[in-house]
């Protein structure tokens, strides 16, 4: 069970966070993935009867969810449990919401370095590292004191 990448995209397709957990992709592939994934997900968003899971390029499954104007997307293995990752995605958004006190896109743009710290507290090497919300928020408060 591995996360290959995590993307946060706005409605226009601009990347607000991009984290590749393995280095198997060239820069050209990464750019192509960003545009294709945004096009695929934003077109599915119009229909309320579609799931938050879609197969992508016969090697990945996309697990995504839209919060306000942002799409949060995981690229996972085809045989992984989608619901676990959807729950993990929601957990990540809950942490962001509590840390930034009602997170918005501007928080992600202007505090991208904090966003990567939060990401590193939860996920390590494409695996879920920590699931305790209080422990993560304590560590982040400690890191804020050091800065």
Image (spheres, grey):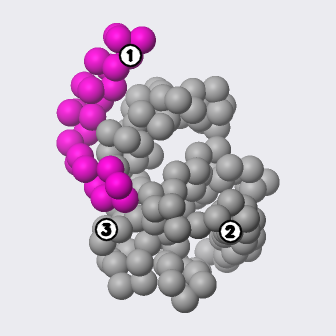
Disc 3 target residue: 84
Look at the image and give the residue range highlighted in magenta. Answer: 124-147
On the image, the x and y values in percent for residue 49 come to 58, 81
Task: Mark yes or no: residue 27 visible.
Answer: yes
Which numbered dot is residue 144?
1
In this picture, is 30 found above or below 1? above
Task: Mark yes or no: residue 102 visible.
Answer: no
Q: Is residue 141 left or right of residue 42?
A: left
Picture quadrant where residue 94 is located: top left
For image coordinates 42% across by 33% down, the residue present is 117
- Give the CA distance from mark 1 to mark 2: 35 Å
- Give the CA distance from mark 2 to mark 3: 27 Å
Q: Earlier in the sequence, mark 3 or mark 1?
A: 3
In this picture, is 115 found above or below 47? above
Q: Are marks 3 and 1 in contact (CB under 8 Å)?
A: no
For image coordinates 64% across by 26% down, the residue present is 110
Label 3 neighbour load within 10 Å: few <14, some 14-19, many 20+: few
Quadrant in which the N terminus is drawn: bottom left
Residues 142 and 82: in front is 142
On the image, the x and y values in percent for residue 80 come to 34, 78
Disc 2 target residue: 29
Residue 133 highlighted magenta (yes or no)? yes
Q: Nearer the viewer, mark 3 or mark 1?
A: 1
Q: Nearer the viewer, mark 2 or mark 3?
A: 2
Picture quadrant where residue 143 is located: top left
């Amino acid at each position: 069970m591995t996360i290959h990448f995590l993307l946060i995209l706005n409605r226009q397709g601009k990347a607000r966070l991009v984290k590749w957990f393995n280095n198997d992709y060239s820069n050209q592939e990464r750019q192509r993935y960003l545009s294709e994934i945004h096009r695929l997900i934003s077109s599915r968003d119009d229909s309320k009867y579609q799931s938050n899971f879609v197969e992508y390029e016969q090697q990945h499954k996309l697990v995504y969810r839209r919060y306000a104007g942002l799409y949060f997307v995981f690229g996972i293995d085809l045989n992984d449990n989608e619901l676990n990752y959807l729950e993990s995605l929601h957990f990540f958004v809950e942490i962001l919401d509590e840390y930034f006190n009602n997170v918005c896109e501007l928080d992600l743009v202007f505090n991208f370095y904090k966003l990567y710290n939060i990401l590193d507290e939860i996920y390590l090497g494409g695996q879920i590292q920590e699931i305790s919300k209080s422990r993560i928020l304590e560590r982040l408060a400690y890191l804020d004191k050091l800065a």
